[in-house]
């Protein structure tokens, strides 16, 4: 029996941002027999918005936490039975700063087809809009929570950016955004560029690139707003 295919299915970054999704996502969903998702409730709602006739209970649903052994076992079994599987993160693209990479890695080990679908990704959208170096960049994920460690990390990222002419991208838990921004303003040099992309694909989307010196003169409310930070010390 031919094994199933894995579809990496993007999700909207916001509930009402279906306009950011390409049309090819729905046919991929319709080919699947099971879904491995970060949040079952929101994924069910998202799918019903795209496909009102979908009978949710006709499909097998598994929640990805830290990808427990039982979930991995079911994933392998379904693929070997020829079932197509969709992997869906809570927002954005599976495996890019979101769960999914472990199951995708297992699919690659099994030599089954993995089909990634184009969709909204806040990291890439922010980089596209930043005007920074898109030829050489790195995503650092979350910076340290400890204030001293975080400031040291910012200094290190600024130095790497300057030495290698690279864009450094990172994120923070939304309720700590304002504290991170203040640390960036306190630590970085005046002429270093900082891009902040907040609420990307939402009606309140804001993506601005300014020098640290310019950022010090304005106020951008970021508390509890999903945001991406890009640093470029050219």
Image: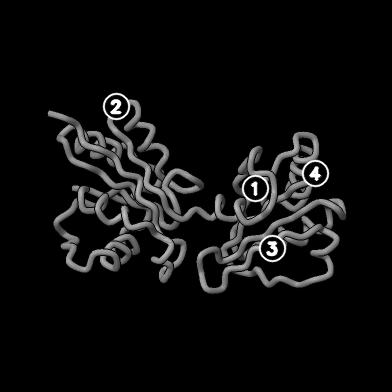
Residue 114 falls in image quadrant: top left
- The percent position of residue 201, horizontal first and vertical second, equals 51, 65
Identify the image quadrant of the N terminus: top left
The answer to which of 195 and 227 lies nearer the viewer is 195
* Left or right relative to 208: residue 17: left
Q: Few, some or many C-alpha atoms within 10 Å of disc 3 (few <14, some 14-19, many ≥20)?
A: some
Mark 2 secondary-structure assignment:
loop
Mark 3 or 2: the one toward you: 3
Residue bearing mark 4? 234
Are the two marked residues, 1 and 3, in contact with CB atoms closer than 8 angstroms? no
Q: Give the spatial CA distance, label 1 vs label 3.
A: 14 Å
Coloring applied to the structure: one colour
* Left or right relative to 114: residue 133: right
Mark 1 secondary-structure assignment:
strand
Residue bearing mark 1? 169
Q: Give the spatial CA distance, label 1 vs label 4.
A: 14 Å
Q: Give the residue drawn at x 44%, y 57%.
A: 91
Does label 2 or label 4 sit earlier along the sequence?
Answer: 2
Are the two marked residues, 2 and 1, in contact with CB atoms closer than 8 angstroms? no
Residue bearing mark 2? 110
Does label 1 or label 3 sit earlier along the sequence?
Answer: 1
Mark 3 secondary-structure assignment:
strand
Q: Give the spatial CA distance, label 3 vs label 2.
A: 43 Å
Does label 2 or label 1 sit earlier along the sequence?
Answer: 2
Residue bearing mark 3? 208
Does label 1 or label 4 sit earlier along the sequence?
Answer: 1
- The percent position of residue 153, horizontal first and vertical second, equals 74, 44
Q: How many marks?
A: 4
* Left or right relative to 162: residue 69: left
Q: Give the residue drawn at x 67%, y 60%.
A: 196
Q: Few, some or many C-alpha atoms within 10 Å of disc 2 (few <14, some 14-19, many ≥20)?
A: few
């Amino acid at each position: 029996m031919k094994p199933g295919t894995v579809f990496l299915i993007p999700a909207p970054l916001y509930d009402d941002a279906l306009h950011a999704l390409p049309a090819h996502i729905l046919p991929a969903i319709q080919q699947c027999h099971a879904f491995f998702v970060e949040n079952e409730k929101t994924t069910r709602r998202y799918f019903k918005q795209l496909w009102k006739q979908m009978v949710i209970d006709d499909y097998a649903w598994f929640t990805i936490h830290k990808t427990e052994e039982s979930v991995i076992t079911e994933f392998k079994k379904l693929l070997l039975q020829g079932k197509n599987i969709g992997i869906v993160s809570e927002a954005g693209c599976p495996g890019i700063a979101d769960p999914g990479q472990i199951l995708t890695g297992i699919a690659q080990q099994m030599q089954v087809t993995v089909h990634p679908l184009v969709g909204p990704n806040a990291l890439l959208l922010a980089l596209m809009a930043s005007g920074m170096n898109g030829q050489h960049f790195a995503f650092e994920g979350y910076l340290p929570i400890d204030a001293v460690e975080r400031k040291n990390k910012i200094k290190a990222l600024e130095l790497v950016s300057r030495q290698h002419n690279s864009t450094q991208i990172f994120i923070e838990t939304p309720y700590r955004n304002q504290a991170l921004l203040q640390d960036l303003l306190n630590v970085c040099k005046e002429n270093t560029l900082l891009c902040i992309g907040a609420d990307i694909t939402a009606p309140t989307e804001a993506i601005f690139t300014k020098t640290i010196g310019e950022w010090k003169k304005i106020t951008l409310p970021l508390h509890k707003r999903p945001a991406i930070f890009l640093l470029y010390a050219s």
